[in-house]
Image (cartoon, helix red, strand yellow):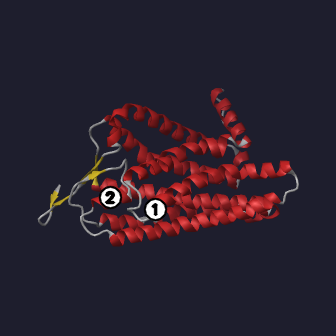
Amino acid sequence: MGGGINQTLVTEFIILGFPSLKKLYPLMFLLFLLIYSFTVTGNIIIFLTVLTNYKLQIPMFYFLNHLSAIEIWYTSVIVPKMLSTFVTSSRAISFKNCMIQLYLFSSLGASECYLLTAMAYDRYVAICIPLHYSSKMTNTTAHQLASGAWIGGFLSPILPVVLISRLFFCGPNQINYFYCDAQPLLKLACSSTQFTETAISTLATGLIFSSFLLTVLSYIFIISTILQIPSAVGRKKAFSTCASHLTVVMIYYGTITAMYMQPMSRFSLDVNKVLSLLYTVVTPMLNPIIYSLRNREMKDSVKKFFKRISRGKDIE
């Protein structure tokens, strides 16, 4: 720690994790290690399958590939450090690395919001105006939407992270959380956080509300179009292409809305830990299951992928 004026400046934080569940740490380590391994492995398989199969080179799977990449990095920013708190006594993280973790996590989360919106728009065009799909959802358009999601995501949290990094931290330095997030950090600040909290809530509300609103509008048109399909089989088939995406959208937006669009003091840290686990650990794990394994075309491609690997042949 470095010296300040009549106070001590914090140069590192201690990640407490889940102090009330210490007796369960061995079990939690195994559980979250399995979840993390499944998440990374599953999303890597999706990524490689789409990347190496020319039949999947369409916008829907192109967006899915970007989502898989986001989920891999998203969970990797959080889970390894969390796992270390279960098995080691070293839980320190430097101030700089804490700000980096906060920025990367926030950036990837914002990128996922934008990408989910792009995926909803893709489904809207495919179902509501199918005759214009090839002209409206070109490869160039898909590239632009995906690039916009990444760029917008990594620009969005710059101001909040800068504001938090400029707060005065004089101690204590124990973060009662399992990663460096805005709320637990604001609780440790010695200087006024009113402006920072207002700015974060406003920016988060704008990001979440705008992306969620566009997603909801897409689904209003999608559902309206599906209900007009005369065949029950046709309605079921059309809805099945959107049900998985809609399910994860509801889980993802529900948890982040509860956390970031409300005043920072509304929920206790214990409640926020549970909400955070949903979208940092559970939702990324669901991606390989919900988005892909229930999609017949993707399921068949994954099977072929493993068959060719087992035979030592190149993937077509």
Q: Residue furthest bottom?
A: 195
Q: Residue furthest right?
A: 230
Image spot of residue 162 (x, y percent): 35, 66
Q: Residues within 10 Å of mark 2 (few under 14, many from 20)?
A: many
- Please say if the residues under marks 2 and 1 sit with CB atoms less than 8 Å apart: no
Q: In the rendered structure, find residue 80 and report the number of the disc placed on it.
A: none
Image spot of residue 117 (x, y percent): 62, 61
Q: Could you tell me which residue is drawn at 37 percent across and 64 percent down?
A: 161
Q: Secondary structure at mark 2?
A: helix
Which quadrant is the N terminus positioned in? bottom left
Apparent side of residue 282 relative to residue 298 in the rendered image (left or right): left
| Residue 133 visible, this orientation | no
Q: Secondary structure at mark 1?
A: helix
Between discs 2 and 1, the one toward the N terminus: 2
Image spot of residue 70 (x, y percent): 53, 51
Circle 2: residue type: Leu
Q: Residues within 10 Å of mark 1 (few under 14, many from 20)?
A: some
Query: Which residue is under mark 1?
Result: 260
Circle 1: residue type: Tyr
Query: Which residue is under mark 2?
Result: 185
